[in-house]
């Protein structure tokens, strides 16, 4: 029998700007939707964080409720995908298929559970058209220049969710203000496509959906047009305009509230700077798993509270490597203990308070120290690791990509020998350290110095 947990889950609700006890619309089935990737390039650690946080919430909800539907979409039609197709000289379909596969593989390697549903936009055009028709019937749109636009003037609550003034909203839209819009904050539900662009037949001509309507429609397709979504998540960069627009569309299509709880994760910074192509500091999962193990990445992504920015730096990685080594050893020494999750009540309680992962890591550390001494703590440690998705059995160690330049190594060793001969031990030490950083270990024999790769 599934053991249901007594402690209520609390979550910080962006809608009310406070921590609330989670109460689903229907106790028998919880519905959660999270904005997934737009598949035009390799996933980076920001994408991984935005997928890991809901993964932990999904695990927690499953502990508490009999049925949980976790929906994470794939945006496989978008202008960015069209640009990538041009530059890679491939079709839009080939690009989206390629990067969907990479995204799903990356997330699986990091120990993320498969969502219950992973709808693709291209499979959902009929429901998108139906949802737009409902919004049109409600009188919330206008058509201009072959575009179907949402008229934000007609929806008095527009801007309440993100708490923005009209000027801030106009700044926030950022794209060049199209001449056919009545107001700069109005947004596109359907736009025309030319022969080169992906498109579908619709009542408004051949074209493709706007970004915001896609999520709203996929939610409705899965949970039912008149049902309220329990939880909606995503990065906090999506609060405006994307989620603001989803709320407007969802309400105007059905005349009922769209979603009860919204949660948003903070940004990932690299050495305290925003990731950007121009800075060249975008860290791709594919590159990262060549350097550190997947479970180390998983742990590092949990090191900050999800609502705070996560600063990715050498020390973040080092701390995670050290913890993982410690955890892994204890886990493997005690792997004969049954792999149940029944002993992780304390951990579940910690996470039930707004997914407090730093506190969960502190708990895991302290229980790992006690695990050597008694069976209860061993069980608690093993089941807590399992609950958090730490798979130490299959945590593939990265294959060191060492481009060994023997000439350089020999030159450094000769230089060091000369320094030692001249009794410049400081310099000799520095050279040893440099070799050490290159993953080269040296040993001084009676007549020579030998080296090997660590």
Image (tube, helix red, strand yellow):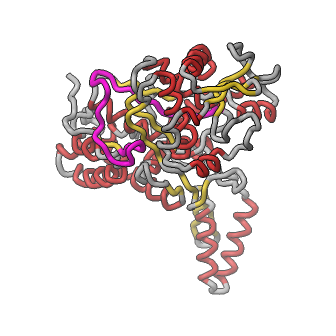
Residue at point 64% right, 32% down? 39
Foreground pick, 380 / 88: 88
**Where, by quadrant of the figure, is residue 260 drawn?**
top left
Percent x, y of residue 448: 64, 70
Q: Tell which residue pokes out farthest to the bottom in this image.
A: 423
Q: In which quarter of the image is the C terminus?
A: bottom right
**Where, by quadrant of the figure, is residue 20 drawn?**
top left
Foreground pick, 190 / 62: 190
Percent x, y of residue 122: 63, 19
Percent x, y of residue 50: 50, 41
Check if residue 16 falls in the magenta segment: yes
Residue at point 44% right, 29% down? 258
Give, as a single range, the part of the protein colored magenta: 12-39
* Residue 358 in the figure: left or right of residue 210: left
Residue at point 50% right, 37% down? 156
Q: Is residue 120 above or below residue 282?
A: above
Foreground pick, 176 / 9: 176
Q: In this view, does 104 lie above or below 384?
A: above
Q: In this view, does 294 lie above or below 320?
A: above
* Residue 274 in the figure: left or right of residue 143: left
Residue at point 30% right, 23% down? 26
Check if residue 86 falls in the magenta segment: no
Percent x, y of residue 369: 26, 55
Main SS category, magenta section: loop
Q: How many marks?
A: 0
Residue 324 appears in the picture as rendered: yes
């Amino acid at each position: 029998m599934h053991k249901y947990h007594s402690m209520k889950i609390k979550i910080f609700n962006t809608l009310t700007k406070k921590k609330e006890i989670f109460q689903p619309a229907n106790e028998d089935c919880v519905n959660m939707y999270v904005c997934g990737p737009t598949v035009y390039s390799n996933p980076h650690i920001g994408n991984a964080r935005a997928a890991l946080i809901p993964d932990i919430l999904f695990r927690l909800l499953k502990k508490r409720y009999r049925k949980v539907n976790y929906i994470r979409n794939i945006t496989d039609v978008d202008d960015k995908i069209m640009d990538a197709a041009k530059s890679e000289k491939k079709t839009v379909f080939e690009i989206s298929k390629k990067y969907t596969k990479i995204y799903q593989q990356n997330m699986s390697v990091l120990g993320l559970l498969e969502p219950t549903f992973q709808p693709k936009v291209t499979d959902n055009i009929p429901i998108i058209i139906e949802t737009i028709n409902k919004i049109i019937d409600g009188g919330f749109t206008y058509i201009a220049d072959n575009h179907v636009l949402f008229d934000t003037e007609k929806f008095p609550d527009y801007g309440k969710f993100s708490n923005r003034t009209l000027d801030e909203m106009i700044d926030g839209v950022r794209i060049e203000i199209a001449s056919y819009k009545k107001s700069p904050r109005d947004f596109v539900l359907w736009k025309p496509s030319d022969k080169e662009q992906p498109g579908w037949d619709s009542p408004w001509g051949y074209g493709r959906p706007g970004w915001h309507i896609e999520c709203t429609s996929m939610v409705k397709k899965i949970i039912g047009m008149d049902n309220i979504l329990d939880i909606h998540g995503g990065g906090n960069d999506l609060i405006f305009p994307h989620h603001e627009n989803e709320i407007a569309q969802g309400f105007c299509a059905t005349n009922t509230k769209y979603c009860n709880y919204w949660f948003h994760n903070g940004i990932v910074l690299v050495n305290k700077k925003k990731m950007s192509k121009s800075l060249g500091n975008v860290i791709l999962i594919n590159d990262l798993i060549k350097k550190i193990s997947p479970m180390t990445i998983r742990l590092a992504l949990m090191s900050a509270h999800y609502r705070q920015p996560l600063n990715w730096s050498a020390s973040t990685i080092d701390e995670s490597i050290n913890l993982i080594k410690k955890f892994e050893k204890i886990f493997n020494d005690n792997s004969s203990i049954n792999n149940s999750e029944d002993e992780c009540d304390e951990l579940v309680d910690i996470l039930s308070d707004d997914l407090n992962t730093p506190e969960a890591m502190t708990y895991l550390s302290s229980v790992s120290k006690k695990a050597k001494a008694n069976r209860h703590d061993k069980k608690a440690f093993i089941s807590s690791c399992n609950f958090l998705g730490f798979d130490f059995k299959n945590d593939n160690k990265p294959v060191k990509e060492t481009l060994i330049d023997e000439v350089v190594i020999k030159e450094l060793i000769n230089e060091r020998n000369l320094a030692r001969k001249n009794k410049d031990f400081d310099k000799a030490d520095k050279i040893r350290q440099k070799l050490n950083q290159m993953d080269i270990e040296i040993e001084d024999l009676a007549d020579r110095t030998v080296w090997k790769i660590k």
